[in-house]
Image: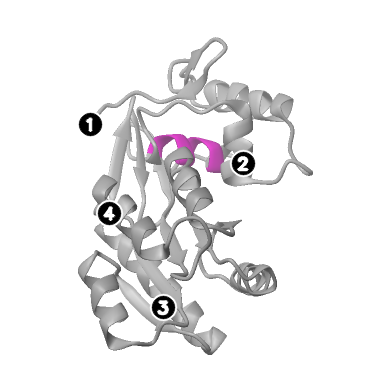
């Protein structure tokens, strides 16, 4: 899972990101941006499971960011985190499509609880079973099954790659994009991604499970 944190106070943004990553019950990473325009750009560049959005932002106001995102998608949960405590601002934010509104200053435990609640709800409403090329992913329990309903045994990294591609079926990802979504560049390399994908294909005895488009990246077929 991936969270976009939009907060113009650098120290606060870093503290929130660090706190969320410390004891999170979901496996996710946090991307931080510090103005409204970067938030919009980042949203259209990546797939996010949750957005934490301040309202008092440079360049583009937070409510405008919210409206832009909601015009593109109604599905992604958005938590407003703002010093604007006026009831009118809360009403406008919720009317524009925010799922929750937490006023500053806040208790971090409450923020963490709201984030986990939104992620949990998002995970539940997603389709629980995704099928691609004789492989099924149980998104609720994060388990992979073969065509005979046997659990597929892969290494942790192999499981993460295949699960990620299945969750995002039909979308192409480069080696770099896979690393950016799943791990850190300090601990993984593009050559290692290629090794993992080769091993996945061999273990499943299915070279077509992950498709490759030369020079563009990897993807799995959109098959129900």
> CB atoms at circles 3 and 4 under 8 Å apart?
no
> What residue is disc 3 on?
114
In the image, the segment drawn in magenta is 160-166
The residue wearing badge 1 is: 224
What's the mark number on residue 180?
2
Q: Is residue 155 visible?
A: no
Residue pictured at 35% horizontal, 27% vertical: 170
**In the image, is residue 223 part of the stretch drawn in magenta?**
no
The residue tagged with tag 4: helix, strand or loop? helix
In what element is the residue under mark 3? helix
Q: Residue at x 33, y 40 (%)?
A: 149
The answer to which of marks 2 and 4 sits earlier in the sequence is 4
Q: Which disc, if any, is residue 70?
A: 4
Left or right of 83 in this view: 118: left
- Cα separation, mark 3 vs mark 2, equals 25 Å
Q: How far apart are labels 2 and 4 at the CA level?
A: 25 Å
Secondary structure under tag 2 reads helix
């Amino acid at each position: 899972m991936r969270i976009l944190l939009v907060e113009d106070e650098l120290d606060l943004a870093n503290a929130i990101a660090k706190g969320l990553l410390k004891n999170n019950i979901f496996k996710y990473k946090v991307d931080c941006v510090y103005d409204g325009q970067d938030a919009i750009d980042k949203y259209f560049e990546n797939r996010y499971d949750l957005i934490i959005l301040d309202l008092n932002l440079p360049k583009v106001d937070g409510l405008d960011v919210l409206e832009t995102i909601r015009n593109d998608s109604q599905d992604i949960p958005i938590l407003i985190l703002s010093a604007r405590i006026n009831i009118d601002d809360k009403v406008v934010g919720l009317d524009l499509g925010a799922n929750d509104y937490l006023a500053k200053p806040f208790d971090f435990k409450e923020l963490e609880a709201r984030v986990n609640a939104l992620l949990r709800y998002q995970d539940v409403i997603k389709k629980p079973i995704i099928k691609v090329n004789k492989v099924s992913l149980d998104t609720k329990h994060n388990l992979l099954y073969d065509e005979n309903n046997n659990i597929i045994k892969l290494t942790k990294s192999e499981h993460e790659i295949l699960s990620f591609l299945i969750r995002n079926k039909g979308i192409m990802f480069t080696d770099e994009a896979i690393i950016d979504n799943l791990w850190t560049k300090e601990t993984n390399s593009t050559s290692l991604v290629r090794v993992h994908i080769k091993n996945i294909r061999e273990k499943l005895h299915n070279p077509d499970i992950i498709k490759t488009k030369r020079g563009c990246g990897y993807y799995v077929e959109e098959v129900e």
